């Protein structure tokens, strides 16, 4: 179901004490403030169980940053969908650009991961987005189209409705350079129209599409106000409670 979401991707940051502290702060914040959006976090996998135990009433969604495309077996260093399901994680990121860039993750692999996650009742947040060179060459619409189709369009309509998409232009991640609200809206509307063309408008209207890339307290509200933007996937600004709170409040009128 389409909903407003603010999700924090902690990437490879924070030791256990710092992670626990921020998780507590988030819980306190959620208890004391009526957020107009779902609040999710994707801490390093080492801390997932701690988050799961702390958020026993599902106050905050608990996501892995990645998971294996394989079911189980000799894949050193990996975690599986079954393991995430067994700790009652909410879901997992799939295809983050840093996984694509540093670990050679392809859309074919993303397709397998998305399916495995769904089979285990997990919510996949499928990430896509073009590089700076692709944007400069005017290929952004095409790149995002290919990524979306290859990773998602083998799913049934019922499966697709359970996926969250995060458009994250690679040139805007961690650079301080944000896509303008109009640039982001253009791609979000494009993704939704691709889904509508294949699955119908009703399915397209049910899918949350998040924007990621240098979302900060001072630009969140304007980005979230775009008609096809349903929230944000936040990196750096999710590491400080004050900043993350202000971004969540981007959904307050
Ligand atoms: P920043 O918000 O630090 O640009 O990171 C965005 C991101 O990659 C979230 O997944």
Image (tube, rainbow, N blue to C red):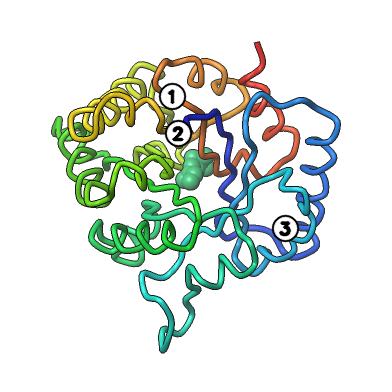
Label 1 and label 3: CA atoms lie apart by 27 Å
Would you say the residues marked 1 and 3 are in contact, meaning their CB atoms lie under 8 Å apart? no
Among numbered discs 1 and 3, the one appearing first in the sequence: 3
CB of residue at label 1: within 8 Å of ligand 1? no
Question: What residue is pinned by disc 3?
Answer: 51
Looking at the picture, how far across and down is residue 230, in whole percent? Answer: 48, 27
Q: Where is residue 18 in the image (x, y as percent from the top left)?
A: 77, 57
Tell me the residue that label 1 is attached to. Answer: 229
Figure check: 163 above or below 104: above
- Pointer 2 with pointer 1, Cβ within 8 A: yes
Which badge, 2 or 1, is on the more N-terminal residue? 2
* Residue position marked by numbered label 2 in the rendering: 210
Relative depth, front residue between 103 and 91: 91
Q: Kindly give the residue lying farthest to the bottom in the view shown.
A: 74
Residue 151 is marked as none
CA neighbours of label 1 inside 10 A, class few (<14), some (14 to 19), many (20+): many
Instruction: Name the residue nearer the viewer: 194 or 237.
Output: 194
| Quarter of the picture holding the C terminus | top right
Residue depicted at 51% across the width and 58% down the height: 65
How busy is the neighbourhood of tag 3: few (under 14 within 10 Å), some, or many (20 plus)? many
Q: Distance between the residues labelled 3 and 2?
A: 22 Å
Give SS at disc 2. Answer: strand
Relative vertical location of residue 243 with respect to residue 95 in this rendering, above or below: above
Q: Look at 17% across and 44% down and name the residue there.
A: 146
Q: Residues within 10 Å of mark 2 (few under 14, many from 20)?
A: many
Relative vertical location of residue 228 with respect to residue 70 in this rendering, above or below = above
Q: What element carries label 1?
A: loop
- Mark 2 to mark 1: distance in Å? 6 Å
List x then y, in percent, for residue 98.
40, 56
In terms of image quadrants, where is residue 130? Answer: top left
């Amino acid at each position: 179901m389409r909903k407003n979401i603010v999700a924090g991707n902690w990437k490879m940051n924070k030791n256990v004490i710092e992670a626990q502290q921020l998780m507590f702060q988030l819980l306190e914040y959620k208890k004391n403030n009526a957020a107009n959006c779902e609040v999710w976090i994707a801490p390093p996998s080492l801390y997932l169980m701690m988050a799961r135990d702390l958020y026993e009433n599902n106050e905050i969604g608990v996501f892995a940053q990645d998971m294996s495309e394989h079911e189980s077996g000799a894949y050193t260093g990996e975690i599986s969908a079954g393991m995430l399901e067994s700790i009652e994680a909410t879901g997992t990121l799939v295809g983050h650009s840093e996984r694509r860039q540093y670990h050679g993750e392809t859309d074919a692999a993303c397709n397998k991961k998305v399916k495995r996650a769904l089979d285990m009742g997990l919510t996949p947040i499928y990430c896509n987005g073009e590089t700076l060179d692709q944007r400069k060459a005017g290929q952004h619409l095409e790149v995002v189209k290919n990524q979306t189709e290859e990773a998602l369009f083998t799913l049934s309509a019922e499966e697709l409705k359970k996926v969250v998409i995060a458009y994250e232009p690679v040139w805007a991640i961690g650079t301080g350079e944000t896509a303008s609200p109009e640039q982001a809206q253009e791609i979000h509307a494009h993704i939704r129209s691709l889904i509508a063309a294949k699955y119908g408008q009703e399915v397209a209207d049910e899918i949350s599409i998040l924007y990621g890339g240098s979302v900060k307290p001072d630009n969140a509200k304007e980005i979230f106000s775009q008609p096809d933007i349903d929230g944000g996937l936040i990196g750096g600004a999710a590491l400080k409670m004050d900043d993350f709170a202000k971004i969540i409040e981007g959904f307050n009128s």
